Amino acid sequence: MPIEGSLREFALHDIFQLLHMSRKSGELRLVREPAGTSGVVVFSGGAVVGATLGEASPRLGYMLLNAGKITEADLFRAGELHAEDPGRSWGEVFRSLGVVEPDELKKYLKFQVEEFVYEFLDWHDGHFLFGERPVADDECLAWIPVESLLMEGARRADELSALGSPVESAEAVPRLAQGAAADGGLLDLTPEEWEVLGRVDGSSDLKAIAWTLGRSEFDVSKIVSTLSNKGLVEIGSQKEVARTKPPHELALDLAGELIERGELELASSKISSVLKAHEDEPRAHYMAARVLERKGDLRAAEQGYENALSFDPLAKEARQRLGLVRLKLGNIDGAARAWRAYLKMVPDTVERRRVQRALSAVRELQIVVSEFDGRERP
């Protein structure tokens, strides 16, 4: 008989304890509200043996990459294989590539399962459903006693609390503090602190920073708390980020809405005003190119996207659109270069998979074109 209910009425700690004490085997399905994020925890004999989080992300891949276990080429190849069969787990993909020693892969899979569970334990709104079923051996990514997970989760919460951390959740957004290095002194930071500080851009939350670094949200939260205590970063929320946007960014937000509604002339006017005052603003160049692309002026759009990338080489949206515009202009090799660069910059999302499919098609087209070029003329 299924066990289901609301996370407001039943804490996940209690649900885990119940499944542990009754030695249950099966799936605990979770949905977080209002975000709608979903997750699954697999139990076997009352122990946690697997967990997945409903986000299309190669988190395992980034952990392996940042640990030096795989190369960017390995990660790219794994992304291609996963795009061909999205139902396949990332663990299976890396196992099939044979680029990681089995024992190492098992260690990182266990780490990922633990991190997913710790994230679930912070969910307080939503609902759960547990269904009993046999669990196959190949589903057992780890064997983790529930007590150890709950104790570690409590320890992490206590440690963050003892730090007096202003970090309230993984959705907190760190930003560089104004005048942090105004005194010109040297910063005495650990390599881990430098690594996290380098990812602080004022818009990425702790979850995103942890994910791209292949680190736990707990570790990143501790480091950000330390950086905050040193006066290097300030911590806010996504809502605060929106409230503190400068006028030109708000104007670009409005321009983006106008583009979506097809009001291209009005959007162009607002973008032009921004560029007059901020000619080195990459987002403005990107949006100007979007208007030109919508109008069908592909040559000018291509130049606009290149302008955006000249000011911000990490502008992934500009890189993606540049590939598409070049393809429309018949520049197959240029499109492939832009898309290869784009795929190195973004996590695994639906949009990334779309670009992967497009790049695979472009590669096939390059092969066919080269075959025609190599054929003797009659």
Image: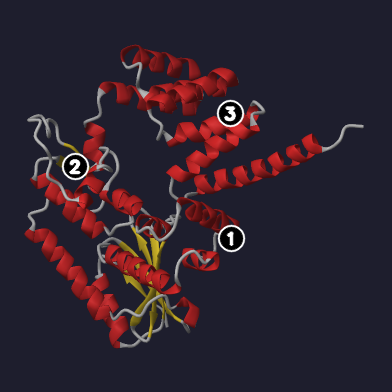
Disc 2, SS? strand
Q: CA distance from mark 1 to mark 3?
A: 28 Å
Give the quarter of the image for residue 215: bottom left
- Which residue is pictured at 42% across the width and 25% down the height? 310
Distance of mark 1 from mark 2, alpha carbons?
39 Å
Where residue 134 appears, x then y in whole percent?
48, 84
Q: Which mark is residue 101?
A: none
Screen quadrant of the C terminus: top right
* Mark sitting earlier along the chain (1/3): 1
Amino acid at pointer 2: Gly
Q: Report the residue marked by disc 1.
A: 85
Give coordinates of residue 178: x percent, y percent: 14, 31
Q: Report the amino acid beneath label 3.
A: Val
Q: Amino acid at mark 1?
A: Asp
Which quarter of the rendering shows the N terminus? bottom left
CB within 8 Å, label 1 to label 2: no
